[in-house]
Amino acid sequence: MMDFFVAPSILLPGLSMPSCLATVPLFAANPFTEPVGVIHYLVVGAVLFTAGIACMTLKRNALGILMGIELVLNGANINFVAFSSSYLRGEGAPTLGLDGQVVALFVILLAAAEAAVALAITLNFYNNHATVDVDRADDLKG
Amino acid sequence: MNPDRNLGTLLDGTLHDTLAVSLPHFRPELCLAATIVLLLLCRMLPVLRLVDSGFLALGGVLFSLFFAWNDVLTLGGGAWASSLGDLLAGRQELFGGLLAFDSLTAYIRLLLAGFLVLFILFTKVSGIPDREDGADFYTLVLGATLGMCLMASANHLLMVFMAVEMASVPSYALAGLLKGRKASSEAALKYAVYGAGAAGVMLYGLSLLAGVLGTCHMPTMARALASLDSMWMPGGTGMALAIGGLMVAAGLAFKLSAVPFHFWCPDVFAGAAAEVGAFLSVASKAAAIALLLRVAFGLGTTGSGPDHAVQMAALGETRHFIVGVVALLAALTCTLGNLAAYGQTNMKRLLAYSTIAHAGYLMMGVAAAVALAGRDAGASRSAVAAVCFYLGTYVFMNLAAFAIVALLRNSLRSEEIASYAGLIRTNPGIVVATGVVLVSLIGLPPLAGFISKFLVFSSVMESVSLDAERPLMLVLLVVGGINTVISLFYYLRVLKVMTFDPPPADRTADAFPLVSIPGALVTALVVPVVSLGIFWSGLYAFARFAGAFAS
């Protein structure tokens, strides 16, 4: 298994800058035996993302759905921050550098703005329907 | 680290980039931002509350339009008319690569600013928002437009996400503008929940793409993609790229209201005021198409360089993936939009499905443009020009359609198609105007919609000659043709109700006459629909100028 990932650097020695893309695998051979790297953070991010999607699709309460959306955004944020670290990504691999962390900061900000608007809309819905159950939002169809 | 790049030179460089290079090209957006601040200030001071927010917004938008026009002239070198299409795009990167300024940016910004002028006049005539809500409404509209301008110029994944959110979040609030209405609050909730979910999925996709390629800057991402050996992607790199690409496509498809992410569109249009529908269906659609062009061309092509040809060849697989996804979505969107429009009884819902179908036609043009980019840059530019021309005529067609719905609602108190029955006996002028708009939406000569559709379909036809994409493009061409025929029936059904059906017995009010302020507005919007069908070379020169960005 390891040979599979070591091979390209021998096969393609002369490529310039982005050659490292092909040589550094995104997923380590066995995450349980490797030291903590970007892959472990990606797994946490993926779990958060999946939990968020499950929350969005299964919850009937509008507030629950909004919480699911926050989970999805934070799963993506973990990815961005993990990808920005050259320590986690390993020697020679491309990293996002400061870009990843700046993106994460902006996403936190936008998530707050979006939550504020979505909560106001939910409150408005509650004022008109006396419920926040999204299944009751069924007047419009066709 | 390079010793020359100490803090001082870095700051000087940033200052120069911001003040001398970026900000002069950012004036239209700055005008919009300043107008938003002014609108909010006017709410705070009792004296200034007397200022009509609509006219304040109109003033700011006119400034923005002036600067956007200036940018077009500067890029075009002052001599626009026929030679514009041959000019280079004049691509520049602003704010350290976050935004791209080129002919597409200039064209879409001009389009958005021009649309806003017409839109604000339309809202002044139709009376929604009232004086009390005016400041809120125009703040939200200008804020969303600011985001749309950024969508048209995004060059960095951070800006892609930021711009989509800046355009979406005010739109959620706009959908809920009619606060006391059940339907309006339901529309806003659905829009916000679907929209935020789609944005979250898109962000996750962006994080995968950026992480694997090691950069957020789209041109650099394209170079990294070109250097990837497609046969040799260890450790799931290829899979991560494909999944990321599909997630980003889902987010963009939501903004475009493309099937299968279109559920929000009919509900939001039916629940929100017709004015909001007009804004979402025109401005939001134009910006989303511009963003799709940006992302597709940003990742699928590289700018001119010493090894341009090699890199373009290496990106063939990326383009093939993009074309496949966009073409599939386009075919589905077009067909489903047109089929679902059949059973509609509410005019706003019918127009929502018509909007979905038109997004499909526009995406066909984008697919053709990306497919052609590998072989023939000139043909690719014409395809982009066709899409841009379509957007230009779409502004007038759809704004006119929604204006008629809103103004008829004001006089008839109904948006049901059945309530328009027999209008020809009392208001032949309005029925003729509606007829012109609907026939143009079908795409029949000699109206503007025909030229747009003809240009887009001929680009798809052009791309059929490509070996790699032939089956897909042939399918696209056939689907487009069949859909045009299908759409004939539901648009003409509205006209049939208006002309042949007897007027409902309980009709109390008459529709507005053509010789009145609302009638003048409708006429002003319908005249371009007719004249652009005959004298289309002027707008087409502009569109070719916008298409030059795909070089």
Image (cartoon, helix red, strand yellow):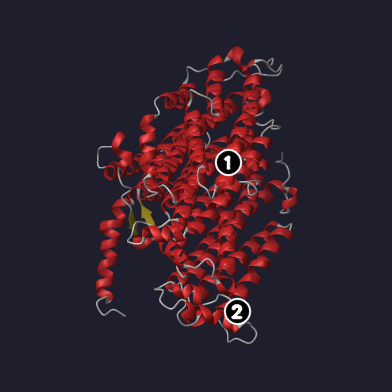
Which of the numbered marks, if any, corresponds to residue B474? 1
Where is residue A6 drawn, in percent x and y?
53, 82
* Residue under numbered circle 2: A40
| Of the pair A8 and B163, the residue shown nearer to us | A8
Q: Nearer the viewer, residue B390 or A109?
A: B390
Quarter-wise, where is residue B341 in the image? Answer: top right
Helix, strand or loop at mark 2: helix
Q: In this rendering, is residue B205 above or below B234?
A: above
Q: What residue type is disc 1 on?
A: Leu
Question: Is the same chain shared between marks 2 and 1?
Answer: no
The nearer-to-camera label among 2 and 1 is 1
Residue found 61% across the figure and 12% down from its top? B425
Q: Please tell me whether residue A84 is drawn above or below residue A122 in the rendered image.
A: below
**Chain ID, mark 2:** A
Q: How many residues crowd around disc 1 within 10 Å: few (fewer than 14), some, or many (20 or more)?
A: some
Q: Secondary structure at mark 1?
A: helix
On what subunit does the disc labeled 1 rest? Answer: B
